[in-house]
Image (cartoon, rainbow, N blue to C red):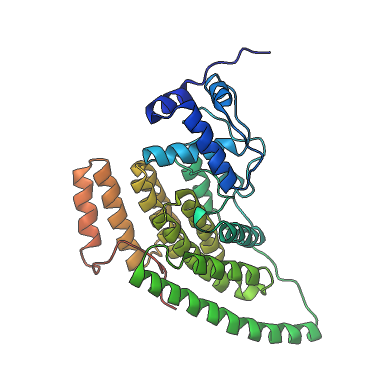
Amino acid sequence: MPERLPNELFASWFVRSGWSKGEVARLVNRRARDLGATHVATDTSRVRRWLDGEQPRDPIPRILTELFSERFGCVVTLSDLGLREPASPIAGTLTDLPWSAERTAELLAEFCRSDLILGRRGAGGAPPLAAGAALVEPVKRWLLPAPAVRPAAVDGGAAVMARVRMGRTAILVEQLEEAARTFREWDAAVGGGIRRAAVVGQLYEVAEVLRQAPEVVQPRLFRVAAQLGLLAGEMAQDCGLQATAQRYQILALHSAKEAGDRSLAAGILTAMGRQLIALNRAQDALELLAVGRAGARGELEPLVCAAADAVEARACGALVRAGKVRARVGACTGPRPRMAVRLHGCGPAR
């Protein structure tokens, strides 16, 4: 059996945190209880073993990344801590892209359900915050075209019933679209996470409808899901739930892809970039913005384009690139109207 080497990366973060081994153990146990992992019972000797090179079991690696990210105010990944991805990763992590339409709806419902149960603590199924290549490279797969699906043939009687269901579903879709607009207006007026549970509950309802809706209305439903997912992410971020916020953004991104709305997807990537700047990952933000612009293929709405320019200016400022800051500020305040950086609707008005 090979000799175990001390985990110098984990030791470095541990020393800089100022925590004792006992404090780390207590923090891990408390977070594990919040996630419903009541089997976790860490003590000082176990923390010592991690420093000596032992790899903790799931969900402890994810908990450690969250704790150190919160401690230092930046994204701390598994690789930063010298930890390996758990052998049984959480379903729907970034590495299993691209998702099918059915899988996207399933993950939306699953994640919203978890978030509603845990309330202000955030969704227990959220993977650790992703950054760097672990985030940017999988997101680039969004640029790949979705495979065409050939609709199944139906007989005359089935076609009549399908039209009846379509009429009922169309009314429901209009109601969901109106609800999404109302939630965006509320959040623009009040801000913060005051109505976060209501938004998550509405998103869960959309996901449930999606799992039974005819294909012809699915793009509209996915667009509503993308808008609500973006809004839920903004609200989670306002509540300090960074991992939960990023997860909603990823779900919203896939929903926008299923909706075929490239401008909305670019707007979601812009929101993701804004979060990464706040977490001291400005270079990652610039790469996501580039992905959004490339994926939009010239279909960016003026409002989304201005938001992307504003976020790029902030990222360049964080990286001390004065010339590029001036260029981006000029772009977002030039012929286009001035706008708030916060972005909710993103796509064209319907």
From the viewer's side, name the closer residue of 334 and 41: 41
Quadrant in the picture for the C terminus: bottom left
User: Can residue 52 be spotted in the picture?
Assistant: yes
How many numbered callouts?
Answer: 0
| Residue 155 position (above or below residue 30) | below
| Front in this rendered view, residue 119 or 89 | 119
Q: Quadrant of the N terminus?
A: top right
Residue depicted at x 67% and y 75%: 214
Nearest to the observer: residue 184 or residue 42: 42
Can you give x and y, in whole percent of width and height, for residue 339 in the image?
27, 66
Q: Is residue 143 visible?
A: no
Where residue 33 appears, x then y in whole percent? 59, 45
Residue 220 horizontal side relative to residue 318, left or right: right
Residue drawn at x 62%, y 34% as measured from the top left: 41
Q: Is residue 151 above or below residue 252?
A: below
Task: Estimate the x, y position of residue 84 in percent, counting from the top left.
Answer: 57, 31
Task: Give the residue drawn at x 39%, y 62%.
Answer: 298
**Vertical side of 46 occupied by 191: above or below:** below
- Name above or below for residue 329 compared with residue 89: below
Q: Is residue 53 left or right of residue 242?
A: right
Q: Residue 120, how many percent across, how many down? A: 49, 57
- Left or right, 336 with reference to 5: left
Question: Horizontally, is 284 left or right of 207 in the view?
Answer: left
